[in-house]
Amino acid sequence: MLVFSAADGVALLIAARMVQGIATGAATGALAAAILDAERPHGPIVNSVAPVAGLAIGGLGSAALVEFLSWPRQTVYLVLIVLFAVEAIGTIVVTETSPMMPGARRALRPTVGVPAAARAANPPGAVGALVFALGPGA
C-alpha cells in the first residue's frame, strides 16, 4: 500500500499491483483455514460470503473516500495501511488453535520411499522394461 500511495506513474502502479496480487494469493488460503479453525459451524459460510462482501464494501468505501475527502489518490491507501496494522496486531494477539505435538519439526522433513508391498509387486526390471517398451523404436 505504501507503493500505491507514493506511485507517480504507471510503472509504479503496475509494480504495486503485482506485489498486491502475490500477497493476496499467498494470504487467501491461510486466512480461509484460520476462519475455518476459529468458526467451526459457520466457517464455510463466512469463507464464501466474506470475499464478495469485502469487494462490495471496499469498492463503496473507497469511492466515498475519494469523493468526499482531500488527497483522493492517497487517502484510500493510507486508510488501508491503518487497517493492515490493526490486522497485524490481531494476528500477533490471536492464540494458536491446534496443540503442539512432539516431533512436529521432524514431520516436516520429506521422506521418499516405496512401500514393501509395492516393491514386491513390481520387480526392479519391470519399470525398466515398461520404459523401454514405451520409448521410440531403434
Image (cartoon, rainbow, N blue to C red):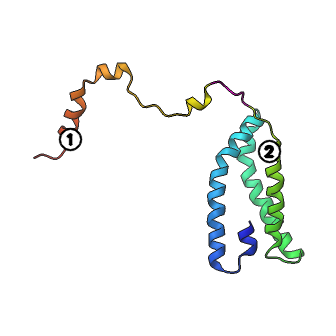
User: Which amino acid lies under the numbered mark 1 shown in the image of this protein?
Assistant: Leu
- Counting from the top left corner in percent of width and height, residue 38 is at 77, 36
The quadrant in which residue 35 appears is top right
- Counting from the top left corner in percent of width and height, residue 81 is at 80, 62
Quadrant of the snapshot with the N terminus: bottom right
Question: For the magenta stretch, what is the residue range?
Answer: 98-102
- Mark 2: few, some, or many residues within 10 Å (few <14, many ≥20)? few
**Farthest residue in the left direction?**
138
Element class at badge 2:
helix
Q: Which residue is mark 1?
A: 134
| 102 vs 131: above or below | above
User: Which amino acid lies under the numbered mark 2 shown in the image of this protein?
Assistant: Ile
The residue at 76%/34% (across/down) is: 96
Judge left or right: residue 93 versus residue 32: right
Residue 124 numbered mark, or none: none
Element class at badge 1:
helix
Magenta segment main secondary structure: loop
Judge left or right: residue 97 versus residue 133: right
The residue at 66%/73% (across/down) is: 13
- Mark 1: few, some, or many residues within 10 Å (few <14, many ≥20)? few
**What's the distance in space between the residues labelled 2 and 1, CA to CA?**
55 Å
Q: Which residue is mark 2?
A: 92
Q: Do callouts 2 and 1 mark residues in contact (Cβ within 8 Å)?
A: no
Judge left or right: residue 73 versus residue 138: right
- Counting from the top left corner in percent of width and height, residue 112 is at 42, 31
The quadrant in which residue 121 appears is top left
The residue at 12%/46% (across/down) is: 137
| 78 vs 51: above or below | below
Nearer to the camera, 86 or 41:
86
The residue at 72%/30% (across/down) is: 98
The quadrant in which residue 132 appears is top left
